[in-house]
Amino acid sequence: MALGKDYEGQDCALARALELVGERWTLLVIRDAFYGVCRYSDFVAHLGIPRAVLSDRLQALTSAGVLERRRYSESPPRDEYVLTQMGKELWPALHALGHWGSRHMSPDGPSKFYVHAGCGTRLNAAGLCPECDGGPVPPEDVEVRPVREGRAGTRADPVSRALTRPHRMLRPLTEHA
Amino acid sequence: MALGKDYEGQDCALARALELVGERWTLLVIRDAFYGVCRYSDFVAHLGIPRAVLSDRLQALTSAGVLERRRYSESPPRDEYVLTQMGKELWPALHALGHWGSRHMSPDGPSKFYVHAGCGTRLNAAGLCPECDGGPVPPEDVEVRPVREGRAGTRADPVSRALTRPHRMLRPLTEHA
DNA sequence: GCGCTTGGTTCGATCACTGAACTCACGGGG
DNA sequence: CCCCGTGAGTTCAGTGATCGAACCAAGCGC
């Protein structure tokens, strides 16, 4: 989103946040990271994002401290991108936006929903578990479930296929070969 | 953000939401609408947004049902833009993103904060009032307060000046002449 | 050596954003 | 009536971001 000048003069925390995560694709990259996507090729295949843009976003998010680049294989040298604590704290914002989108922008209803892994209860609008004391549910304890399990959509990439069954968030979706 | 194709193939509520509110400036326009900005010239002065972009965003948000265009004067013909119910439901997402920005992207701390107008308690991270039964606080019941009351920043437009004192959200900030 | 996979970079074409100027419809003062 | 000011836009040339496809390189497996 940064187009030359970035919202300069806006003395506002929202503007600061948008300078980093408000660019095209950035929030979808972060959402995929919550789903457990951590490899370059999986981002490309699942998002259909241009590779140059993905490189740019991963770099920006890494140097801002939202993602961390971690080497998981020396030979061949392979890195993965995982959310930092700062990145994980974006979960409430992501969930709120997604909830709004499913209420107002999804004519066929959502394709996935979120449950508290501890008790199996669906999260409410605020991202809280209505069963367990109503406290906030950290993303580690959230499970993503497809509305129609096993029914693949039109997409056939590894990430989309893995998401046709329930998956604990932040756990890697694809095994490192 | 819509650049030709809009995240096509992403069977995801978040992608749907971002196709509308993910474009540059859009969320800041909506934030200003929560603050009570409703006139074209006030948006321009407060955001520093190019007029062509503002026209485009107001049109898109209006036809999507997030804003409503309402005539408040017949002669001269003057319209104002106000949030619809659908628009007001973006408040949790906006608050969550702003909260994240103030925690991680604002070295000097936030310049404004939000309190529950009913009891004067500062809202917590989830946008709930910790005093009043912990339930969600609708934006109508939220007051924006500057951290240092009366201290204007570097900006001198009517909206910035009005926001140097506490203001109930969604109430018009400037009087129609 | 040869192909395959992963993780990128490069590049021309296209699209979006910017800033400044211009338009248009009123309303008021002289 | 003429001129100026205001609010709400539109137009337009210049610049920056994004797109998609091609290209590159390192390290296997055979």
Image: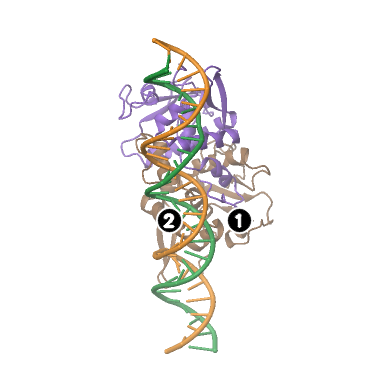
Chain colours: A purple, B brown, C green, D orange
SS at mark 1 in the image? loop
Q: CA distance from mark 2 to mark 1?
A: 22 Å
User: Do dots 2 and 1 share one subunit?
Assistant: yes
The residue identified by callout 2 is B58
In front here: A68 or B65? A68
Residue kind at label 2, given as amino acid type: Leu
Q: In front: A92, or D27? A: D27
Residue labelled with disc 1: B163
Say what amino acid the circle numbered 1 marks: Leu
Q: Quadrant of the C terminus of chain A?
A: top left
Q: Is residue B39 visible?
A: no
Which residue is pictured at 68% across the width and 44% down the height? B108
Q: Nearer the viewer, mark 2 or mark 1?
A: 2
Q: In the figure, B122 relative to C27: above or below?
A: above
Q: Using the rendered image of the protein, determine whether residue A156 is visible from the camera's viewpoint.
A: yes
Query: How many residues crowd around disc 2 within 10 Å: few (fewer than 14), some, or many (20 or more)?
Result: many
Vertical placement of residue A170 versus A10, above or below: above
Label 2 marks a residue whose chain is B
N-term mark: 2 or 1: 2
Residue A33: which numbered mark, if any?
none
User: Which chain is home to disc 1?
Assistant: B
Residue D21 lies left or right of residue B44; in this view the side is left
